[in-house]
């Protein structure tokens, strides 16, 4: 009788302990999800029927303190004008909390260095393979050097840039192309000019950066600075422009980004 009593007591206390552990584990998982959800801001919301774009501004290196707010503001204007929902987070864990099945495009706005862990890489890769769209702005090419798939999605990694934000001349490769038919064949703009280590030969260049117009170019006469391509089931659009806040107010860039975003979302505005 006594022995049984002790055994029962032990079993009860053990199962209570197990319950406690399960409870704490469940609480921990719940708190992580709550934390990830709390890190997502809704910038523009129309309705559940409208498409959603998610902006990620996570950084593990340089933080573009002018370009990030300017980029968010421009995307907000585009979301209001073109009636899509717009969410934002500076935390990569938000990729896990977002309902990516209801997201048309993810924008990496001036992200830097290693921002995604294995789980987040899997989630994001699944999104692209499921037909999702990607827009990379400026330092999106200075991101995830340790993940070759990402380099191929963007099309290139950042290699270097000359100092400052000099005036440079861009050539519109095809003035008939819907992405660029609002642009002059040759135009000038101030920005920071990236040299690239190209990762994907299939990118379709839209704008060429003329190295003769500024000092410190290293890619030669063919120096793509904006491009697009379909990749691994999804769509990718990248623009190297976007260091200076003023660029996000330049009507030539505004319309170009609007078209790139529409392509990534798989819609026409
Ligand atoms: Zn920059």
Image (tube, grey):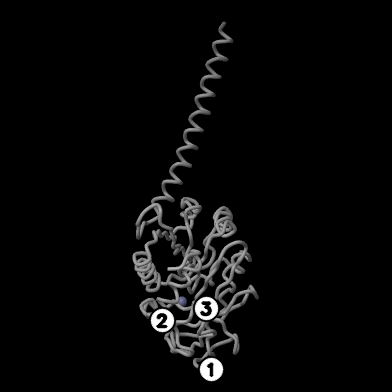
- Please tell me whether residue 209 is drawn above or below residue 231 in the rendered image: below
| First reached walking from the N terminus: tag 1 or tag 3 | 1
Q: Quadrant of residue 187?
A: bottom left
Cβ–Cβ below 8 Å for labels 1 and 2?
A: no
| 3D distance between C-alphas at marks 2 and 3 | 13 Å
Q: Quadrant of the N terminus?
A: top right
Q: Is residue 186 above or below residue 71?
A: below
User: Residue at label 2?
Assistant: 252
Instruction: Please state the horizontal and vertical placement of residue 161, each as a whole percent of the image.
Output: 52, 82
Q: Residue furthest bottom?
A: 212
Nearer the observer: mark 1 or 2; the answer is 2
User: Residue 236: which quarter of the image?
Assistant: bottom right
Task: Residue at 58%, 71% (x, y): give it.
Answer: 229
Secondary structure category for the residue under label 2:
helix
- The residue carrying mark 3 is 226
The residue that mark 1 highlights is 212
Q: Position of residue 87 (x, y in %)?
A: 40, 58
Q: Earlier in the sequence, mark 2 or mark 3?
A: 3
In percent of width and height, residue 171 lies at 51, 88
Mark 2 neighbour class, 10 Å CA radius: few under 14, some 14 to 19, many 20 or more: some
Foreground: disc 1 or disc 3 = 3
Depth check: give the residue in front, 7 or 63.
63
Residues at discs 2 and 3 in contact (Cβ within 8 Å): no
Number of numbered callouts drawn? 3
The span from disc 1 to disc 3 (Cα, nearest Å) is 18 Å
**Residue 137, placed above or below residue 177:** above
Reading the chain from its start, which is encountered first: label 1 or label 2? 1
Q: Nearer the viewer, residue 185 or 147?
A: 185
Task: Classify residue 153 as left or right of residue 36.
Answer: right
- The quadrant the C terminus occupies is bottom left
């Amino acid at each position: 009788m006594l022995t049984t009593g002790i055994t029962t007591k032990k079993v009860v206390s053990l199962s209570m302990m197990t319950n406690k552990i399960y409870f704490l584990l469940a609480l921990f998982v719940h708190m992580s999800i709550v934390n990830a959800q709390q890190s997502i801001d809704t910038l523009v919301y129309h309705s559940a029927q409208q498409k959603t774009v998610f902006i990620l501004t996570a950084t593990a290196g340089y933080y573009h303190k002018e370009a990030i707010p300017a980029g968010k503001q421009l995307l907000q204007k585009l979301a209001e004008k073109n009636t899509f929902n717009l969410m934002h987070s500076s935390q990569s864990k938000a990729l896990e909390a977002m309902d990516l099945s209801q997201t048309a495009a993810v924008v990496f706005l001036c992200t830097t260095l290693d921002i995604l862990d294995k789980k987040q890489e899997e989630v994001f890769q699944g999104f692209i393979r499921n037909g999702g769209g990607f827009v990379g702005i400026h330092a999106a090419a200075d991101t995830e050097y340790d993940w070759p798939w990402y380099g191929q999605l963007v099309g290139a990694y950042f290699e270097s840039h000359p100092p400052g934000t000099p005036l440079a001349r861009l050539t519109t490769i095809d003035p008939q192309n819907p992405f660029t038919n609002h642009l002059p064949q040759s135009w000038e703009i101030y920005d920071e000019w990236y040299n690239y280590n190209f990762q994907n030969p299939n990118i379709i260049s839209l704008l060429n950066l003329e190295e003769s117009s500024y000092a410190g170019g290293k890619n030669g006469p063919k120096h793509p600075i904006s491009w697009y391509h379909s990749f691994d089931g999804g769509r990718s659009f990248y623009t190297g422009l976007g260091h200076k806040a003023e660029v996000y107010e330049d009507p030539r860039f505004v319309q170009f980004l609007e078209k790139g975003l529409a392509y990534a979302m798989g819609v026409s505005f």
